Amino acid sequence: MEIIRTVGELRARLAREPDVCCVPTMGNIHDGHLSLVKIAVQTAPVALTTIFVNRLQFGQGEDFERYPRTFEEDCAKLEAAGNAIVFNPDEQQMYSEPQAFFVDPPKVAKKLEGRFRPGHFRGVCTVVLKLFNTVQPQSAVFGKKDYQQLAIIRHMVDQLALPIRIIPAETVRADDGLALSSRNRYLSKQERKEAPRLREAILQIRDAISDGDRKFVAMEYAAGALLSRNGWNVDYVVVRTQRGLKRPSPDDSDLVILGAATLGSTRLIDNLEVVAP
């Protein structure tokens, strides 16, 4: 497996590659990331994973400095999964001068995660576009765990006419249902036992919708109350349309349940798609 750290070297290396599938990450590779890499390996002759902790998407008080950086372990896992190239630029490579041009995402980026993390998706879209311009892949894999991110990246690719196919990947979970995340390592032993309750709250809404219930506000309130009673600080548990992440109308059937809440000092997110009868 090759490790490349400069834009010039990467472009020279990829000049002879007609088909590249990219997996953008911030490192601290776990089984969730590896599931994306496996899709990339099956999609194109060259699977390329980027590892870059992007300062622009962290807000004030968020965990940029303590975000786990485990590069050697990451590379061992990626090589075992069949990844061909790791692009690991430093901040000087990505931002040789203060970033003056940004991608301004649409209004949906200010809702849900965007409401609680102002500027987050501006930073995400800017770095993803920059990585796409550097790698120039034919396809890229993003996990459904970050559902709003996936929706916004897809929209950006469509609106800016980027010649890249975005491939969604299902969320990978622990045996008890907890979505895998780099931030799970911050949970205490007791918090880790409690953490699957976010998934349980979402499943309760899914079951109600599958039974024909469309009282979405009542479901959302009940799910939030369940979490609050068990020590969570709830940001949101909501039902939205899969396309556009809007409040459902009576005719909408392709829905997604999204939740975000903090347990102790660790903020967790999760979601689940559901088709209403």
Image (tube, rainbow, N blue to C red):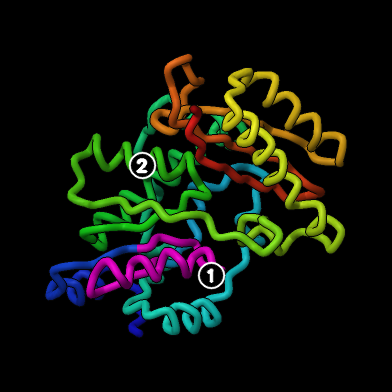
Magenta-drawn stretch contains 117:
no
Residue 32 x/y as whole percent: 53, 63
When the figure is inspected, residue 141 is found, relative to residue 113, above or below; the finding is below
Q: Amino acid at mark 1?
A: Ile
Residue 80 x/y as whole percent: 44, 84
Magenta-drawn stretch contains 33:
yes
Q: Is residue 39 left or right of residue 181?
A: left
User: 236 or 215: which is nearer to us?
Assistant: 215
Q: Which mark's residue is nearer the viewer, 2 or 1?
A: 1
Residue at 35% x, 38% y: name it: 103
Picture quadrant where residue 2 is located: bottom left
SS label for mark 1: loop
Residue at 61% x, 22% y: name it: 213
Q: Which portion, as a residue range, is magenta?
A: 23-50
Q: Cβ–Cβ below 8 Å for labels 2 and 1? A: no
Provide the residue designation for mark 2: 100
Q: Is residue 160 left or right of residue 189?
A: left
Q: Which mark is residue 29?
A: 1
